[in-house]
Image (cartoon, helix red, strand yellow):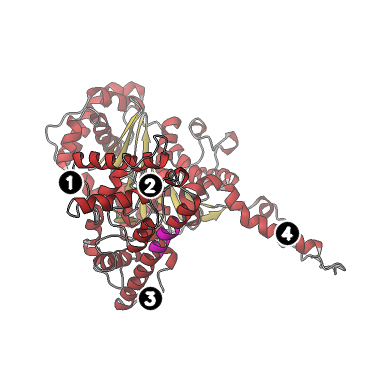
Amino acid sequence: MVPLLLYSISSASEEKGEASKIPEPRVEESSRGQLPFPVAMAAVAVAVAVAEPKTKYDRQLRIWGDQGQAALENASICLLTCGPTGTEALKNLVLGGIGSVTVVDGSKVEPSDLGNNFLLDVGCLGQSRAKSICSFLQEMNDAVKAKFVEESPVTLIDTNPSFFSQFTVVIATQLPESSLLKLDGICRKANIVLVAARSYGLTGLVRVSVKEHNIIESKPDHFLDDLRLHSPWNELKEFTKSIDINDNDPVVHKHTPYIVILVRLAEKWADEHDGRLPSTRQEKNKFKDLIRNHMLNLDEENYKEAVESSYKVSVTPGISNEIRQIIDDSSAEVNSCSSDFWVLVAALKEFIANEGNGELPIEGTIPDMTSLTEYYVSLQKIYQAKAESDCLAMEHRVKDILKRIGRDPDSISRSYIKAFCKNARKLRVCRYRSLAEEFSSPVLSEVQKYFTDEDYCFAMNFYILLRAVDRFAANYNRFPGIFESEIDEDMPRLKTVAVSVLNDMGLNGASLSEDLITEMCRFGGAEIHPVAAFVGGVASQEVIKLVTKQFVPLLGTFVFNGIDHKSQVLAL
């Protein structure tokens, strides 16, 4: 095993040899009972230190919250190769407050680096590229710990695979295919997330690789409010019955919440239709007419909201197919080695069959609506109480399961259980094929579909050609088109290599675009900064999703086509 030289970027005062010890303040007595000035200033400093992260990260905290930010600040990222693509990815993470970064790159800064890497300047020429990048990144956010390793990523993968087990995520940029395959195997064995990114001329790709990634807060763009209007529980029924929807008082009538209106009129409908709720289009239209018939005036916004939300009464009871697949997954048969996520899934399955009566725990929130304040507050409390009751039932089941599998009953926090219950309808489990599986045995039906689809055809061509240029480099020790004088000879060479890639994938007879083969040779292996910035930005976005375990990461290979300004995700 080759010993590593691991460096840490220290503060300017430490580099100059200045004293780092802070002298103890002299505390003087105060005749008026106030804090002595040094102590008061220390208290202010502590308060500012606590408030600073919330001020610094205010905008992003609104997206992923305190839990997401805490996950970022506890994460450790390793970047392999700090060219423009990798640097752009790392810059975004450093600005976002990632805990620590380690840059692995054995290159020195060359004149060509100054043209496509904005974190380098003339003063960096001849110096370690990894060290220079770390210095500039630290200036962007001094709260982030930045380290660097002056060694070739390819050599490190070959000689010290255990090095990668210390990280949360490894970002591999511009790696040749052979090294990327080795790294994927190393990361999968250590359960480390790998994000591979590549920019090449006017194209690029990003690929996530991890055995399994579980998401509680998937945060879909559109999701139906969890109001349970199709199956109201007793407390909600009692509250709705306490309000007379036929009250002729115009103020009360036009400020009755639409939840109350829909629950009462759904009951009326069910009484008149053998207990059934409206299901067909015709029935749903008649139900809307029933709502309109209860309006006293045409300007009653609450009744308009009731008409617009009437479809919520007809929601199919029970759980979705996606959640059914999760609770029926073999991983839900838990043991002492199971993750907290799967323990909660096992508890969820028991809850659905018992306390939930076929339903998931309720979210406990209601949307804005036209309502008297007292009515709205009462509804909020009813939904929150139901959510708290469901969460308590889940907590008991989690503790019972933990006891059965020989784990500490308190090893899963209540806050985690509460977040799980609130987002139970939005759970996602993402499983990724290894890169070796994708390269050697892709899903042929998908590949053939992409080749014949006008929107995906170029993306599939670029995917093949990006693999082909790596094989070309392995054969000729250079990328195609590096030397202008050999571009014409490189085109048929690259085509031959690309055909071999197709054959290895089981795609005998598939054809590639001659124009794109020509363009790949013209690119000459260049990392163009605008393309690198875009690809690096996508990579950093995926890292944030994976670290915070919020939002759904890319479920295939993301391919960017800079010629047509398009991007697609290929599920191979």
What segment carries the magenta color?
Answer: 380-388
Q: Circle 1 is placed at which residue position?
A: 441
Mark sitting earlier along the chain (2/3): 2
Q: CA distance from mark 2 to mark 3?
A: 42 Å
482 relative to 546, above or below? above
Residue 168 picture quarter: bottom left
Q: Is residue 51 above or below residue 567?
A: below
Disc 4 packing (10 Å; few <14; some 14–19; many ≥20): few
- Front in this rendered view, residue 472 or 246: 246
Q: Is residue 316 magenta?
A: no
Q: What amino acid is found at the position of numbered circle 2 in the picture?
A: Tyr
Q: Percent x, y for residue 468? A: 26, 35
The residue that label 2 is drawn on is: 258
x, y percent for residue 223: 34, 46
Q: Which residue: 85% across, 69% down?
A: 29
Q: Which corner quadrant holds the C terminus?
A: top left
Residue 414: x and y in percent read 43, 67
User: Which amino acid type corresponds to the residue marked 4 in the rendered image?
Assistant: Ala
The residue that appears at 36% across and 61% down in the rendered structure is: 238
Which tag, 1 or 4, sits closer to the chain's start? 4
The Cα–Cα distance between marks 1 and 4, rounded to whole angstroms, is: 60 Å
